[in-house]
Image (cartoon, helix red, strand yellow):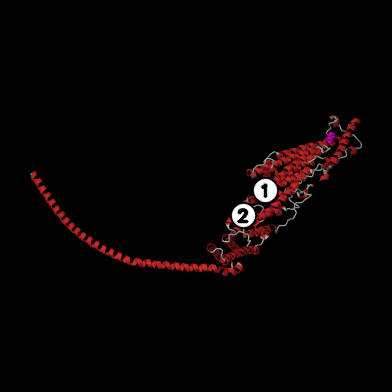
Amino acid sequence: MADLSNMEDIALRKTEINSKLEKEMSNLSLLRDALKKSNTNTENMLSILTSFEGRLRKLEQTIVPVYNETENLRRRQENIDKTMTTLDHVLGYYHISQEADMMIKDGPEMHGLDRYLQQMDKILEALNYFKKNNQNTVELRDVAALFEQGKDCLQAEFQTLLARHGRPVPPVSVLDLIGGDEELQGDTSDVQMEHLPEKVIEDLSDISKWLITNGNTTDFLKNYITMRSSMLIKSLTGHFSKKASTALLKSPFEAGHRRTGSAAEMIKDEQCDVDIDVYITELTALLKLMQSELQLLVQIVPEKYQRSVYDNIVQPGLESVVNEGETLAAYSRKSIGRHEFSSVLSIFPVVKHLRSIKPEFDRNLEGCQAPTRAKLASLLSTLGSTGAKALEEFIDNIKNDPDKASNMPRDGTVHELTNHTMVFMEQLQDYVETAGAMLLMHGEQAAPSEAVDDRKSRLKLADYCTKVLSALGLNLSNKAETYSDPYLKPIFMLNNFNYILKSLRRSGLIDLIHKWNKDVEMFYEEQIMDQKKAYSQSWSRVMHFILEMNEPMSSQRMANPDAKLKDKEKQNIKDKFTGFNKELEEILRTQKGYAIPDQELRSSLKKDNIEFIIPAYKIFRDKYKRMNFTKNLDKYIKYTVEDVEEMINRFFDTAA
C-alpha cells in the first residue's frame, strides 16, 4: 500500500514539472520574438541618426562661415565706435585749455565750487594724457599752466572762505560751555561751537580733499593752521581782562578779634599780573576751544594730516597759558624769597584746577607731538614743585623766626607769627589733596605720580600740619622766654594756644590732623590748663596775706573778738590788710595791661580769678572786721568783697 501511494505522488509531481516546463518554453519563445523586434528597431534608429548627423555636418559647413563673418563685422563696428569716442575725447584734451580758461580765471566763487572742481577734474585728465602720450608739446604746457592756476585759485578760495567766515567764539558761548563750574564733570569732548557755517565747512572739506588727492599739495594747510590758531588765541584772550590780583585768597576771622587779616594784607610789594580767577577760567576755556577746534578740523582736513595740523593749531594757545602759569610760578618763587607765603597760595587753586582737567587735555592731545603733550605736564610740575618748596620753606621760616623782645607783643596777645601761620594753614583746608600731592610728588621724599592718591595726599598734609604746629609751639615757647614779667609768659602762651586750638576747630583742620595724630586736640587742651595754672601763681603774693600763712591768730583770740589785742597783734593784722591792698592794686595795675583778646577765654580767666580769690578774701575780711585792731578801719579794710570782684573784672581791660 505504501509503495502504491509513493508511485502516485511521483506521477503527480512529474505532471506538474512537465506543465511548468511547457509554460517556460512558451515564455522563451515570446522573449525571442521581442528581442528580434528590438534589434530591428535599433537598426532603424541607427540609420536615422546617421542620416541626421550627415545633414547637421552639411548645415555647420554652411552656417559657421556666415557667423564668423558677422562677428568680425560686429567687432569692427565696436572698434570704430570706440575709436570715434576716444578721438572725440582726445580732441577735447586739445581744446580744454580754451574751453576752461575763462572759468579757471574767474575762480570757483563765480561759477560754483562743484562746477569748478568738475572742470579741474577734466583738466587733470588732459594733463595726465599729455604727460603719457605727448610730452614736450604746447598743449601739455598750456594744460599744466591752467592746472596750476586752478590749484592756486582753489587755495585762494580756501583762504578766502576761512577769512571771510571765521570769527572768534563769542565770550558768552565759551562761558556757557564752561557753565561756571571749576571742576569738569564727565566726558566734556562733545563741545558745540559754531566756528563756520555748515555750507562753508562742506566747501572747505571738498577743496581740501581735492587739493590733497588730485592737486598733490598741502600748502593750503599752512593757511588753515595760521587762521585757526589765530582764532583760537582771539577767542581765548580777547574777552578775558588781565587785571592785577589784589586779593588772592581771604580767610575770615572771628568777630571781636583785634588781629584780623587776609592773605592780601600780607602782600606788600610786587603784585602778580596774573589774575587767578581769570587764569583758571582761561584754562577751562582753552580746553573747550581745543576740543571744538578738533571737531571742526576733522570735518575739513583728511585724516592723514589731522594730528599734525591740530598740533600746530593748539601750540600758540597752550604756550600762552603755560607762559602765564610760569609767570605765576616765578612770582611765587619771589614771594617765597621774601617770606610772603600766603601770596604763594595763589598757585594752589590753579594746581587744583589743572590737576582736575589735565586728563581731558591729555585725551584731547593724543597723537600730537611729545613736546606739545608735555607742556601742561611741565607747567603742573613747575607749579607743584613751587608749592612744595613754599610749604617746606614755611616750616623753616617758623623755626627760624627770631626771638626778639622788640617784636613781642607787650600785652601778651597772639603773636603775629601765630596769626600768619594759622591763616596760612586755614587756607590749605580748601586744597587738602592738592597740597598733599605737592608734598608727595615734589617734597624731600618724592613719590612717583602713580603712587599718589587722595587718601595718601590727605595723610601727607595732616603730617605736614602736625610739623607746622610743632615748629610753631617750639618757637612760641622760646619767644615767651624774652618776657621779663614771669606771669606774662603764661598769658602769652595761653593766648596763642587758645587761638591755635580755636582756629583748628573752626576751620576743620583738627579733623584732618587727627588722621595723623589723634592726640593734638588733647595736647592743646592740656597746655591751656597748664598755662592757666602757671598764670594763677601771679596771685601768690596776694594770697600770701589772706591765707594767714605768717603768724596766724590763735583760736582763742578769734573766739573773743572784743578782747583787747596786743600791739603786736594789731600790727600783724594791719600788715596783712596793707599788704593785701598793696598787692591787689599792684596786680590790677599790671594785669590791666595784659591782653586776652578772646572774649570766652577772658571771661573764663576772670571767673577763675574770682573763684580763687573772693572766697578766701571774704573769710579773711569777715574774720578780722569784727576785731578791734584799729580806730581807722577804712584805712585798712579798703575794699569790700564786691569791690575786689569788680577790680578783678577790670583785668585785661586794655585788650577788652
What x and y, as percent, mark residue 255? 77, 48
The range drawn in magenta is 540-546
Q: Which residue is mark 2?
A: 308
Mark 2 Cα-neighbour bin, 10 Å: few <14, some 14–19, many ≥20: some
Q: Amino acid at mark 1?
A: Ser
The residue sitting at 28% across, 63% down in the picture is: 53
Residue lying at the far front in this picture: please name it.
136
Mark 1 Cα-neighbour bin, 10 Å: few <14, some 14–19, many ≥20: some
Q: Is 243 or 547 nearer to us in this picture?
A: 243
Instruction: Identify the element where label 2 is drawn.
Output: helix
Instruction: Identify the element where label 1 is drawn.
Output: helix
Between marks 2 and 1, how big is the CA–CA gap? 21 Å
Q: Is 631 colored magenta in this rendering? A: no
The answer to whether any part of residue 83 appears in the image is yes
Q: Is 223 or 92 nearer to us in this picture?
A: 92
> Which of pointers 2 and 1 lies earlier in the amino acid sequence?
2
Q: Is 348 or 297 nearer to us in this picture?
A: 297
What x and y, as percent, mark residue 501? 73, 42
Q: Main secondary structure of the magenta part?
A: helix
* Above or below 461: residue 127: below
Name the mark on residue 378: 1
What x and y, as percent, mark residue 342? 75, 47
